[in-house]
């Protein structure tokens, strides 16, 4: 009897562990997120780019950033005035999504690489993401 209960409990645990959503699975697969600011792409005294991003490995912060902006569906098309300038921050989610953004308005775009000054298309950065990126970058 005891053996059957233990076996039943093991089967239930296996079934429950297989019921995570695709979104939760994607979050679990991301082990680091990189945040760059424009200074990471400025040449040093020898003319070399610095590329020293803030690397986020804390699972709670990763989940927070994924919920704030780790899915393209969270970004809405920018329908307002097009701004002149370049991105100040980039967040590389480690899943192929790299978002560049301005530092003073929730405005940015999808980028092919971190440091890309413009990217396309222009989109509204989800509420709270820009502020959190700036805070985590230490440039606040």
Image (cartoon, grey):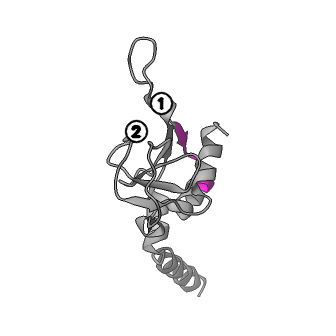
Residue situated in front as seen by the camera: 30 or 83: 83
- Sequence order check, earlier mark of 2 and 1: 1
Residue 59 at x, y percent in the picture = 58, 53
| Residue at the far left in the pictured view | 112
Residue 90 at x, y percent in the picture = 47, 45
The reply, left or right, for residue 62 in relation to residue 138 is left
Is residue 117 inside the magenta stretch?
no
Report the number of numbered marks: 2
Residue 28 at x, y percent in the picture = 49, 60
Residue situated in front as seen by the camera: 89 or 70: 89
- The residue under the point 34% across, 55% down is 120
Q: Is residue 78 above or below residue 87?
A: below
- The residue under the point 45% across, 43% down is 85
- The residue under the point 48% across, 74% down is 20
- The residue under the point 60% across, 40% down is 137
Alpha carbon distance from label 2 to label 1? 8 Å
Q: Is residue 88 above or below residue 12?
A: above
Residue labelled with disc 2: 115
Q: Is residue 25 visible?
A: yes
Residue situated in front as seen by the camera: 52 or 90: 90
The reply, left or right, for residue 95 in relation to residue 15 is left
Q: Is residue 58 visible?
A: no
Q: Residues within 10 Å of mark 2 (few under 14, many from 20)?
A: many
Please tell me whether mark 1 sits on a helix, a strand or a loop.
helix
The reply, left or right, for residue 55 in relation to residue 110 is right
Residue labelled with disc 1: 40
Q: CB under 8 Å between callouts 2 and 1?
A: yes
Is residue 59 inside the magenta stretch?
yes
Please tell me whether mark 2 sits on a helix, a strand or a loop.
loop
Q: Is residue 34 above or below residue 10?
A: above
User: Residues in magenta?
Assistant: 54-61
Q: Is residue 85 above or below residue 125?
A: above
């Amino acid at each position: 009897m005891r053996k059957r209960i233990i076996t039943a409990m093991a089967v239930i645990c296996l079934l429950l562990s297989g019921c995570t959503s695709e979104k939760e699975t994607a979050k679990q697969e991301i082990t680091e997120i990189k945040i760059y600011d424009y200074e990471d792409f400025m040449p040093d005294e020898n003319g070399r780019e610095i590329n020293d991003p803030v690397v986020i490995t804390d699972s709670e912060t990763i989940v927070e950033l994924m919920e704030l902006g780790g899915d393209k569906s969270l970004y809405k098309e920018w329908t307002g005035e097009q701004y002149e300038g370049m991105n100040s921050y980039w967040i590389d989610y480690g899943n192929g999504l790299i978002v560049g953004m301005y530092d003073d308005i929730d405005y940015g775009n999808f980028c092919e690489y971190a440091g890309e000054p413009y990217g396309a298309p222009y989109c509204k950065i989800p509420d709270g993401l820009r502020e959190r990126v700036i805070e985590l970058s230490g440039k606040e």
